[in-house]
Amino acid sequence: MPASGNVLIVVFDGLQPSQITPELMPNLAQFARAGVTLANHHPVFPTVTRVNVSSIVTGCQPGKHGLAGNTFLGRDYDPHRVIAAMEPTLQAVVAATGKALLAPTLADILGSHGMEYIAIGTGTSGNAYLHNPNAATAGGATIHPDFTLPRGLDAELSARFGNWPEPDLPNTARLVHARRILTEYILPERNPVVALLWSSEPDKTQHEDGVGLGRAPQALAEADAEFGELLAYLEQSGRAGATDVFVASDHGYSTIGQVIRVEPMLRAAGFPTIDQPGGVAVAANGGSALFYVHDCEAGAAERLVSWLTAQPWCGPLFASERIGEPAGTLPASLIGCDGPRSPDLAMSFSWHSAPNSAGYAGHAFATGGAPGQGQHGSMSRHELRNVGIAAGPSIRNGTVIETPTGNIDLAPTILHLLEIGGADGTMDGRTLQEVLANGYCHAPEPSITTHQAAVGDYRQEVQVSQVGNARYADWGNRV
């Protein structure tokens, strides 16, 4: 066991930093005061869950890890069909191509050193699967209400803990069940070097009721109570003094202002399906949409850009280098979204900062849902800010860090704590030395750049921060 002990990661899906208050989440608020708060923490774009899961476990941007969206088109799997990143389909991708992700995960790296990574979560099956797609060879485990990796583990856990509760809003009963398995089986019996607990709240409730509205305060309070139970277990079991705890969310949130059904509009505009010359496929991802053109045709891409930039809802637009540089676009590599499995074009809807009726800032267009509900996926500054907190024996006390950080930094920082090298040069994230008790005292200064592109009446602007080689998208919008 490394000298630093164990690492525990807790992710609250869709939690916004502004929701961590003594009134809504007293346990998490107290935890943050005692440790390090990353006040300028970033998800990757698109700001959807399964893309950010992949970045958390690989330390890489989407272009490198190869999971482009919650829905996407994988040309190496099926060049003509948009698919959802859910467990059965991802398993089929592995069977056909050999890989769910193009970069090694924490589970892969730890397994090569004889260590275990075990994740348990109450989110989607795709979320859970991506934590450890190679469990059969890497070791460790993934535990989810629908399946486990390795596959035979579900029977053992069901016999011991009973069946998973049915999903609900808030999804607290399932979180309680997951926390019990974590504290009664995973930590005391398996004792993995890295364990992860993923709460589907407040995301699940805020998608339905709205950001901070309806049952969302209840979801926040109940998720926080389970976090309190977990902290109490660490204290009572004597593990607190040897466990570094990282708390994160996968993305921020916006309120849906208007729903835009992009694919029917494309067809009405005369774009055929992708299996035909000049055709286009669209993968809807909430506040963003990913586009793929037939055989990566530059002419079809240019026609698509011309149509998109004429739409009032079109925000930032990024092009893969495989289709050239259509006028009005920025390179997808600017925000880490270009790679072997990337879309030809990635678009964020435009957005504004007006608050909803609960006082939470940020409205954006969306590919689905209904006005007033919560959504994410865009380049809104309210979605490109998420939660990052750490506390434990290796972490500084009572510190707020304003330097840009991101989900891509969790894996390299954890590997550094575990005294496992190799992240430098292979991951897009960086070791957060400013977080560590034995790290440097002053956080590095970021460079901040603004990038613009225009065509006709359309103009976009994107801000990017960089620390060392790590790059973070701050926001992007039509201006």
Image (spheres, rainbow, N blue to C red):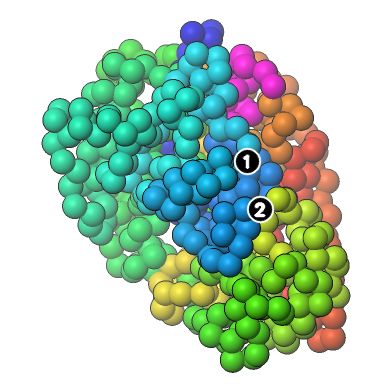
Q: Residue at x 26, y 52 (%)?
A: 171
Is 427 magenta? The answer is no
Between discs 1 and 2, the one toward the N terminus: 1
* Side (left or right) of 82 relative to 446: left
How many marks on residues?
2
**Whether residue 289 is situated above or below residue 436 in the rendered picture:** below
Q: How crowded is mark 2: few (under 14 residues within 10 Å), some or many (20 or more)?
A: many
SS state under label 2: loop
Q: In which quarter of the image is the C terminus?
A: bottom right
Compute the Cα span from label 1 to label 2. 9 Å
The residue segment tinted magenta is 411-422
Q: Is residue 323 among the parts visible in the rendering? A: yes
In percent of width and height, residue 20 lies at 44, 48
Q: Which mark is residue 18?
A: none
Q: Name the residue under label 2.
A: 341
**Whether residue 168 is situated above or below residue 32 in the rendered picture:** below
Q: Residues within 10 Å of mark 1 (few under 14, many from 20)?
A: some
- Residue 331, by quadrant, is bottom right
- Say which amino acid is labelled 2: Arg
- Say which amino acid is labelled 1: Leu
Is 412 magenta? The answer is yes
In percent of width and height, residue 137 lies at 47, 25
**Whether residue 109 is situated above or below residue 473 in the rendered picture:** above
Q: Residue at x 64, y 91 (%)?
A: 269
* Side (left or right) of 386 relative to 215: right
Front-lying residue, 442 or 112:
112
**Whether residue 339 is situated above or below residue 283 in the rendered picture:** above
Q: Is residue 126 among the parts visible in the rendering? A: no
Front-lying residue, 102 or 28:
102
Q: Are circles 1 and 2 on residues that touch, CB within 8 Å?
A: yes
Q: Mark 1 points at which residue?
A: 102
In percent of width and height, residue 173 lies at 21, 46
